[in-house]
Image (tube, grey):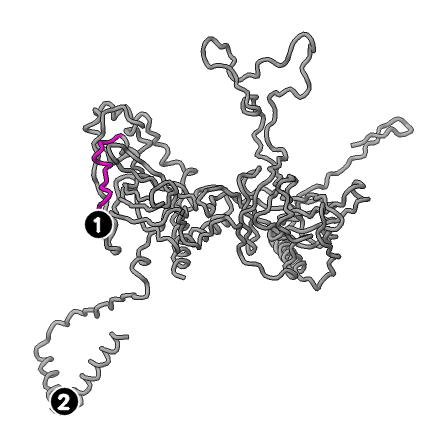
Amino acid sequence: MAACAKGLDKCMFSLRLLRSPRLQNERFLSTSLGRLAPKEPSKFTPPPKPVVIDKTQTVAAQRKFLSPEFIPPRQRTDPFKFVIERKDMIRRRKVLDIPEFYAGSILAVTMADPNASGKINRFVGICIQRGGKGLGATFVLRNIIDNQGVEICYELYSPRIQKIDVLKLERRLDDNLMYLRDALTEYSTVDPDMNPVPFSLTEEVPVNKMKVRMRPKPWSKRWERPKYNVQGIRFDLALTPEKMEHAQKWAQPWREYDMLKEYDTAQLEEQILSEVQQAMSK
Amino acid sequence: MCTNESSDGCLLQAVVVKTTTWFDEHLTEDNQEYMRKSMAQEYRRQTVDKLNPLKDEPWQRHDWTQGSRRVGLVAVKLGMAPVWTKAGERHVVTMLQVQDCHVIRHLSKEEYNGHTAVLVVGGKNVSPFHRSEEQMEMFRNAGVPPKHKVTTFKVSDNAVIKPGTPLYAAHFRPGQYVDVTAKSIGKGFQGVMKRYGFKGQPATHGQTKTHRRPGASGPGGDPAKVFKGKKMPGMMGNIFVTAYGLKIWRVNTKYNVLYVNGSVPGHRNCVLKIRDTVLPTRSSTLLSPPFPTYFTEEEGDLDEDLYDDNLFIHTDPSLTLT
């Protein structure tokens, strides 16, 4: 609207110019002069595209992120069951703000605990795993307190959780950071009084390409095996190339071609995302 | 094929021609489509009609007395979900949806067994093309579409309902206890370790070809036989199993879904039978549930969700345990 109004003004201005008698005479002159010295036709420059700033949508809603527990698993369940479960999840999300986070982000969770002093319990840790679907979705936070590794598995939709803060939002090279149990302790320590790192919602989530040094073997799981598909470990410091090759024996290269195991969630995700965003904005 | 010997000694054979076929074998594609659509429309009309109370006069409604039993429902198992109480404890519930539950027949005491009257109830509409004529006659008399599961509920005389009345999930209320019966998941022919939990034999230390066998089968020379009912390998599962005393945490009246505590026999999307508990310590005398059943037109509007007192509702603020 603003653009065309501006155009109209220009148009009116030029019309007024043309109507003035002085210019009319000069106009004839200028056109004749133009014919004498032919210029190359000026290149057509399209008008600048108007920048639309939609101020009705909040910045948070513009960010297209669907929490992984909304995506239903590949089962023979009636989709209606997921619909009613999603309604309950949205009801809970309207009361408790569950922010966006990934495995590798540092979170602080405040929970109601009958055994704690003041009945409130605050735990800060790095998220190593996000599991479960629907109302039973969980995430595991890991931290090292007084030289003791502590992991707590929280349920996202539990009513005992009072607050979830993301102190540092980032991603890692893997979705599952269980290998931090066998890594050196410095990689799992998080300062409980850490200040939240500011993050602007319009940027993409940064991926921390850190590769972790491991304690000497034996590990709790054989992380070098291809089924875990771990990208974030410095295997060159932990294992010899022969051992790495030996681990490749357990590779199943046919799995990526197995069509029956395919589960394409793109359409489902879009549909569920639009449904959730609509319901949350009400 | 029957053979008859005639008087002159030669055999006469009467050949019986089999005419069983599926409904759309001899129909064109357009006609098949039309049949399916027309049936679906017919059933929708039938269910909608039954909701209108002015159509038929319902039977006399009596009040609840001590010792009276009311009908149950037929529902479909959707799946399971977690649920939290106001004290912060976590329980699991199974979601059961009551789909198209209608009363089909009433058999009085004399017709049934001389002791109790019975109501035949069906749930979950299904296509008529694979039901026999006798079954279809029964459904037609009630004016109801054919059902996947048809069960009988023993009922006291003051709780009889007219055939054709729809039954809803609001028939049960939160805080009540129910028994759920369904066919358990079939496991096929199973050995004695899985079927009865026998311990089997050790894996090593010289066992020759004996690791999961039943071992001894009885005493010895005195009976000199194996008693009847001896636990042996056989077909496991696919039998009717009842789970008793399950609490109802929540009832969704809009979609007819019951949230029932714990797990329930049967696979997902299986059809089950729900009735009031038989257990004496969990009977529903305290709650006064709708008797004989919940009628939408008479009891008016209920909230979309009915919750148990102890249940945490997701729209409430987070718990602060003090």
Q: Chain of mark 2?
A: A
Please give the label number shown on residue A24: 2
Q: Amino acid at mark 2?
A: Gln
Residue hosting label 1: A197
Give residue B238's position: percent from left, percent from top.
Answer: 61, 33
Give residue B287's position: percent from left, percent from top.
Answer: 62, 50
Helix, strand or loop at mark 1: loop
Residue at (41, 54) in percent of width and height = B317
Q: Nearer the viewer, residue B233 or A166?
A: A166
Q: Is residue B28 visible?
A: no
Give residue B82's position: percent from left, percent from top.
Answer: 47, 44
Please give the label number shown on residue A277: none
Mark 1 neighbour density, 10 Å: few (under 14) some (14–19) many (20 or more): few
Q: Amino acid at mark 1?
A: Val
Q: Could you tell me which quadrant the N terminus of chain B lies in?
A: top right
Q: Chain of mark 1?
A: A
Q: Which residues are magenta?
A: A182-195
Question: Is-magenta flag for residue B153?
Answer: no
**Separation of marks 2 and 1 at Cα, in angstroms:** 66 Å
Helix, strand or loop at mark 2: helix
Give residue A221's position: percent from left, percent from top.
Answer: 31, 28
**In the figure, is residue B6 to the left or right of B128?**
right
Per the picture, the main secondary structure of the magenta-coloured stretch is: loop
**Precedes in sequence: disc 2 or disc 1:** 2
Residue at (67, 7) in percent of width and height = B221
